[in-house]
Amino acid sequence: MQTLILRGEPAREEAMAKLRAKLSAAPRAPGLAVVVVGEDPASAVYVRNKTKACEALGYRHQTHRFPAETSEAELLACVAGLNADPGVDGILVQLPLPPGLQAERILGALDPLKDVDGFHPENLGLLVSGHPRCVPCTPRGVLRLLQHYDVPLAGRRVAVVGRSVIVGRTLALLLSLKGKGGDATVVMCHSATPDLAAETSRADIVVAAMGRARALDRRHVRRGAVVVDVGINRLPGPAGGASLLAGDVDTAAMQDWAAACTPVPGGVGLMTVAMLMQNTWEAMCRREGLV
Amino acid sequence: MQTLILRGEPAREEAMAKLRAKLSAAPRAPGLAVVVVGEDPASAVYVRNKTKACEALGYRHQTHRFPAETSEAELLACVAGLNADPGVDGILVQLPLPPGLQAERILGALDPLKDVDGFHPENLGLLVSGHPRCVPCTPRGVLRLLQHYDVPLAGRRVAVVGRSVIVGRTLALLLSLKGKGGDATVVMCHSATPDLAAETSRADIVVAAMGRARALDRRHVRRGAVVVDVGINRLPGPAGGASLLAGDVDTAAMQDWAAACTPVPGGVGLMTVAMLMQNTWEAMCRREGLV
């Protein structure tokens, strides 16, 4: 069995092309504000990618940088200013925040209508209640990638491994929603699951989002299943060389085993920024009364 | 195998006794306001039970009754008044609302700190993010009942059948949370699950919450599993007689088959009002700065 590689690039390009078509008819460009605290190197890469995407689409964008020792009060003041700024449609607080700052308190202060990461409790709650408004970018990107490659979900058994808010829990909620893009039977697996392989090897689709490099192998995946690898783990490279990126799946072991598998890098990760652009567009449309 | 009947009464009495002990040392009695629209007969029973529980515990309580043709604006005005009333700690809008009224709009207008049913998006979202504040009463009651009978959850496989916000989705989130009272591996099953018995018969604990009378039988439950029946279905009684209540499980078939099973009536249903009292107590504590 030749394993199909579910590359992120064509799915991202499709999403961006659709967005460009809408933007060309829009009354104004959406505006995104990114708040960065401290000097996390991975965050720096992500913020750069977001800025590039804004520039590619003609979004207005601003980045607010704070040192790691910034107080909660200073950040809340920044958020309040961005909430009130009519030119800002979306606000993204880059996670993780430095120790000492509680993400829940900062995220909870965002105007939920500008919360383009979808982590404000009100947006998470609307997802539970089946009326999603702003959906977190990575789960949304997973769905979009599967849709691009015509992977059906309705009636399928999906094992989601990992219970983070950012990916696992929100993705499980989305997949199990009634109707189009949902209707999957979802099993939520995590670090307290005694026999992980027993759960995942029954699944038609396995989503790995637990943040452990190459932790899933052939024992965890039945022959012919579809594998979505959300993990991005940095491993030491060969002596003196640059570090390597690895997913949560042993990708080499999936060759000629899985029906399809997303690569790392170049898979789901590419979708996340595109979905952020999509969310920011939709936030503008809601604010302008266009939806 | 003698099947243990997980009666709700002792679990409810334990919860109420603990609550009474706390109330005896409280600075004031909690206050609950119930909003009822229209004349749903089942709702009338539930509202009566809530009033009785308030009286038994010495809570202040008020019931606001509206005819079925009440406008959204009138209800929102009532909610705004209750939000502002310092004597009201908890507000409950009895569901279902008559056709023409959108529950999301009314529930979304509640002060989230007074939302003792836990259906406001902000409270549902806090459950997703792993910091539950006000947890819906029925899922909370299920956990409390299982706890009363020392049914372990950590590392167990739980099948939740039904994806309502009120029970299935919120219970799945609770059961899969990290830590005490959670850590279960949860499979979310629903009307689009092609082979329900294949999922539920693998589970250590089966929770039936899909609202179909006696739909689960021995094919769906492995020998020795624990069965929690959340369904309350009204069936026609014998000719001329009163109607019957039936759960979502064929309880008779569970005898000498399941390790344990909750009865209907007299099982989970008894817990719901006790958990409402608990939520109202906690809402008062938060408002008074006691937690």
Image (cartoon, coloured by chain):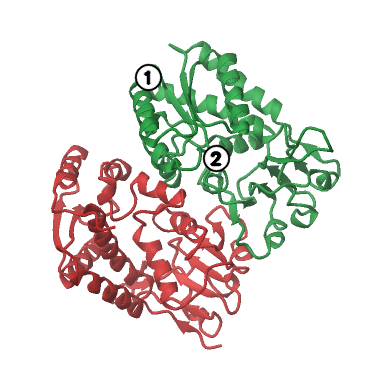
Chain colours: A red, B green
| Residue type, numbered disc 2 | Lys
Q: Residues within 10 Å of mark 1 (few under 14, many from 20)?
A: few
Q: Nearer the viewer, residue A138 or B80?
A: B80
Looking at the picture, how far across and down is residue A37, in whole percent? Answer: 20, 51
Q: Is residue B65 above or below residue A104?
A: above
Q: Is residue B190 left or right of residue A59?
A: right
Looking at the picture, how far across and down is residue B75, in whole percent? Answer: 40, 31
| Residue type, numbered disc 1 | Glu
The residue that label 1 is drawn on is B288
* Tag of residue A28: none
> Quarter holding the N terminus of chain B?
top right
Spot the residue most to the front.
Answer: B69
Q: Nearer the viewer, residue B46 or B264?
A: B46
Spot the residue most to the bottom.
Answer: A2
Q: Is residue B111 visible?
A: no
Of badges 2 and 1, the one in the foreground is 1
* Tag of residue B180: 2
The verdict on a common chain for dots 2 and 1 is yes
Q: Is residue B133 left or right of residue A113?
A: right
Q: Measuring 16% from the left and 53% from the top, which residue is drawn there?
A: A88
